């Protein structure tokens, strides 16, 4: 282990991506370089995971003053919450380079840029630094979707860009509000995310700032009703771009709520928690029912991803240790299961030249290994016991019931919708009579199988033996609620039981 490990993980892919963009290299060379760099980031992430001691505080801290007069610093660090999003990014990105070798040089370069920006966002401990990486994340997605997307790529690119920029401007205003409030309280300027937790903000201005952050993060998650950019973007984007958006980038929106909003707007967050939780439940139901009506399997998976992000949002807004722990666990479970399903969708599209469910059938007999891996990822997506999805969903529902019985019940019932459309998809594509498009479908090659095996094993290990993962998450989630002040009990939407629970967890 060496110093500045997080900085290396951030800037190694960014620098390599910039070199690939401007160097006169072939597509094959760019793919090999991209795979090598992403593999190096994976090795470094394993070093981080092994050295992480789960103290509940930031670890691997790097601090360099950037603009001292304003208290802005190059400040990095990770805890049990950011660790698992970082690991998901590092583990999943190398798969893209192995599975898809037909893209242009610029595409592989942009994948490296977005990987570095995403890692930077989850490691940033300074609000300005977080905002910089948050904005940088959009640029590679803009080019990958706009240059390499499907027939309707331009409208999809404009929609996601306008949504994201609008949210980012609101976040910038809210960010400035926090800094001004901290200066008024202490007499010094600071953009430290940890120090923002010292603020005790309430009132109309605080509520406006809260919603400024929440709209930006809700767009990225996406949370109902800010999800309307998702179906077109996920469907028109190349598979690897959809994979990045769904498996990792959406989780950074959830991370922003946990890292920035919850500590800085403690009372206002509690006041509106029930409202946001219902938005999560409505999103689960709406996107799940919409998924049932889809004939395009990639569009079905897009709505499925949005539906599953709803339960992750419910976990955040349920405001207790069980739900928040389940949220972090479900972030990894969703990244591995739904992310892998999008990769499988890309393979299906490449080999059959169609995305229509009605044009496919009988693939299980043609490609048994592909069918087995798809089934494991699909069953994890619907939360089958013994897979990673079950642990996260169980903890979230447990915490949701503790927060509000109606929210907990509706969340549990909404999961049934996901079971319906995923089993319907699997039955139609893999077991019905073989169609012309799929009758010569080739099974996964040994190299492709090897790329999927680690993630499939991770899905099973996290479902069968979750303790090693929960042990690294729980101290950080407990730390969040240990810092809760009794003023939270004054929030109008917090039940007496939850208020007592927060006070108990503090003491």
Image: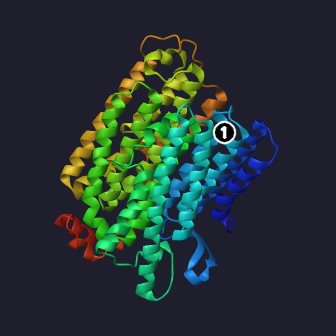
Q: Which residue is mark 1?
A: 97
The N terminus lies in quadrant: bottom right
Report the residue that reaches farthest toward the right.
24
Q: How is the image coloured?
A: rainbow
Residue 309: % across, % down? 39, 46
Is 240 on the left-hand or right-hand side of 424? right
The C terminus lies in quadrant: bottom left
Is 350 on the left-hand or right-hand side of 334? right
Residue 463: % across, % down? 42, 43
Q: Secondary structure at mark 1?
A: helix
Does residue 121 lie above or below 438 as drawn?
below
Q: Nearer the viewer, residue 288 or 453?
A: 288
Q: Nearer the viewer, residue 68 or 254?
A: 68
Residue 485: % across, % down? 30, 76
How many numbered marks have been drawn onto this rendered protein structure? 1
Residue 77: % across, % down? 56, 68
Does residue 349 lie above or below 182 as drawn?
above
Residue 328 appearing in the image: yes
Q: Who's the residue at 60% across and 82% down the image? A: 68
Report the residue that reaches farthest toward the bottom.
187
Q: Who's the residue at 48% across and 11% down the image? A: 434
Mark 1: few, some, or many residues within 10 Å (few <14, many ≥20)? many
Dividing the picture into quadrants, the one containing residue 3 is bottom right
Q: Who's the residue at 44% across and 26% down the image? A: 296
Q: Who's the residue at 81% across and 42% down the image? A: 25
Dividing the picture into quadrants, the one containing residue 49 is bottom right
């Amino acid at each position: 282990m060496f110093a500045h490990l997080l900085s290396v993980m951030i800037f190694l892919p960014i620098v390599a991506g910039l070199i690939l963009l401007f160097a006169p290299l072939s597509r094959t060379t760019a793919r090999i370089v991209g795979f090598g760099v992403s593999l190096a980031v994976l090795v470094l992430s394993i070093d981080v995971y092994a050295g992480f001691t789960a103290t509940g505080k930031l670890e691997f801290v790097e601090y360099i003053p950037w603009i001292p007069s304003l208290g802005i610093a190059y400040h990095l660090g990770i805890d049990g919450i950011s660790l698992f999003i970082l690991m998901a990014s590092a583990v999943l990105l190398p798969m893209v380079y192995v599975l898809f070798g037909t893209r242009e040089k610029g595409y592989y370069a942009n994948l490296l840029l977005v990987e570095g920006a995403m890692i930077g966002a989850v490691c940033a401990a300074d609000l300005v630094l977080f905002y910089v990486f948050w904005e940088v994340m959009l640029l590679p997605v803009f080019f990958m979707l706009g240059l390499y997307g499907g027939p309707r790529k331009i409208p999809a690119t404009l929609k996601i860009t306008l949504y994201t920029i609008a949210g980012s401007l609101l976040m910038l205003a809210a960010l400035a509000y926090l800094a001004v409030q901290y200066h008024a309280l202490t007499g010094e300027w600071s953009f430290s995310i940890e120090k923002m937790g010292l603020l005790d903000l309430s009132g109309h201005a605080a509520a406006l700032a809260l919603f400024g952050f929440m709209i930006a993060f809700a767009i990225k998650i996406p949370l109902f009703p800010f999800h309307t950019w998702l179906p077109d973007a996920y469907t028109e984007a190349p598979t690897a771009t959809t994979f990045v958006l769904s498996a990792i980038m959406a989780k950074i929106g959830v991370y922003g709520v946990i890292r920035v909003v919850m500590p800085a707007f403690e009372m206002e967050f509690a006041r509106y928690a029930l409202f946001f939780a219902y938005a999560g439940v409505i999103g689960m139901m709406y996107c799940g029912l919409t998924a049932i009506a889809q004939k395009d399997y990639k569009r079905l998976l897009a709505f499925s991803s949005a539906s599953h992000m709803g339960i992750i949002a419910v976990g955040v807004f349920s405001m207790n240790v069980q739900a928040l722990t389940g949220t972090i666990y479900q972030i990894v479970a969703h990244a591995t299961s739904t992310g892998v399903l999008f990769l499988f969708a890309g393979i299906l599209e490449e080999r059959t030249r169609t995305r229509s469910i009605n044009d496919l059938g009988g693939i299980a007999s043609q490609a048994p290994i592909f069918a087995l891996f798809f089934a494991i990822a699909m069953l994890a997506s619907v939360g089958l016991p013994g897979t990673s999805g079950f642990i996260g969903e169980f903890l979230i529902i447990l915490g949701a019931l503790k927060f509000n019985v109606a929210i907990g019940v509706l969340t549990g019932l909404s999961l049934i919708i996901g079971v319906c459309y995923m089993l319907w998809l699997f039955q139609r594509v893999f077991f019905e009579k073989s169609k012309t498009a799929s009758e010569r479908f080739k099974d996964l090659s040994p190299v492709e199988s090897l790329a999927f095996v680690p993630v499939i094993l991770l899905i099973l290990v996290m479902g069968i033996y979750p303790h090693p993962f929960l042990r690294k998450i729980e101290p950080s989630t407990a730390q969040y609620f240990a810092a809760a002040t009794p003023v939270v009990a004054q929030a109008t939407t917090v039940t007496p039981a939850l208020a007592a629970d927060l006070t108990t967890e503090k003491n």
